[in-house]
Amino acid sequence: DAKTTQPTSMDCAEGRAANLPCNHSTISGNEYVYWYRQIHSQGPQYIIHGLKNNETNEMASLIITEDRKSSTLILPHATLRDTAVYYCIVSGAGTASKLTFGTGTRLQVTL
Amino acid sequence: GAVVSQHPSWVICKSGTSVKIECRSLDFQATTMFWYRQFPKQSLMLMATSNEGSKATYEQGVEKDKFLINHASLTLSTLTVTSAHPEDSSFYICSASPPLVQSPLHFGNGTRLTVT
């Protein structure tokens, strides 16, 4: 699986958009970009994933560059409950595709 | 959405005893489940891939005789930590995905194991 690079930490004011970047320059053509987050002492929570088109769901938007070498997760209106470690993971699709976690970005949402 | 349940959520055991952790897919069948371990302030590390009806595949450095995995049905995988020691104290997390090609993995809420 391709390796990803994320900033160690970020801050965001409550109510503002949180934009979390991820570099995955070695991504291959059949690999998806997945985003998960982990709130302290809980299992990771799935947020969104995409292949090459931008995606949006009720939690977030995922913007993938045309060359697919990087992506940005956007939380449009961050709240205190969005404080967590956010993981960007590149992996193949399918039920047998394991996910390899990096160190992620610790997002701190403040008042 | 897909729900993965783990039990127990936390357990304390004495050194030398064994502990079993259950992982269930509540609303879908999972031929493959994954077991992760997370130490404090670290990321999740994949321990093994659990395959229904066959032997688990362990990651390098994970002792298969110490961490016994059984995936006897399409909705249940168990991880047994045998002869537990204090260094086995960790957060154990399982995951599974519904049988659709693009379905993402969903994770249980983890089991906090403390070995005294």
Image: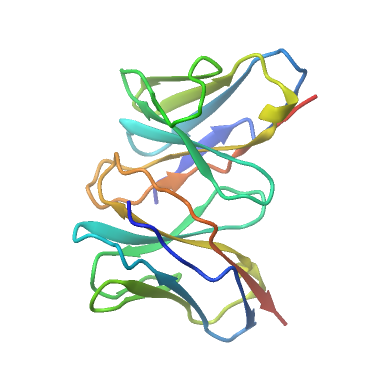
Please give left or right for residue B55 compared with residue A101 in the image.
left
Please give left or right for residue A30 compared with residue B47 in the image.
left
Q: Nearer the viewer, residue B21 or B68?
A: B68
Labels in figure, total: 0
Q: Nearer the viewer, residue B98 or B14?
A: B14
Q: Residue furthest right?
A: B116
Residue drawn at (25%, 65%), measured in percent from left and top? A51
Q: Residue furthest left?
A: A29
Which image quadrant for residue B92? top right
Q: Is residue A24 above or below residue B28?
A: below
Q: Position of residue A81 (x, y in %)?
A: 64, 68
Q: Is residue B112 visible?
A: no
Q: Position of residue B1 (x, y in %)?
A: 39, 51
Which image quadrant for residue B51? top left
Residue drawn at (33%, 34%), measured in percent from left and top? B30
Residue drawn at (49%, 68%), measured in percent from left and top? A6
Q: Position of residue A88 (x, y in %)?
A: 44, 62
Q: Nearer the viewer, residue A3 or A72?
A: A3
Q: Position of residue A104 (x, y in %)?
A: 53, 61
Q: Is residue A72 above or below residue B54?
A: below
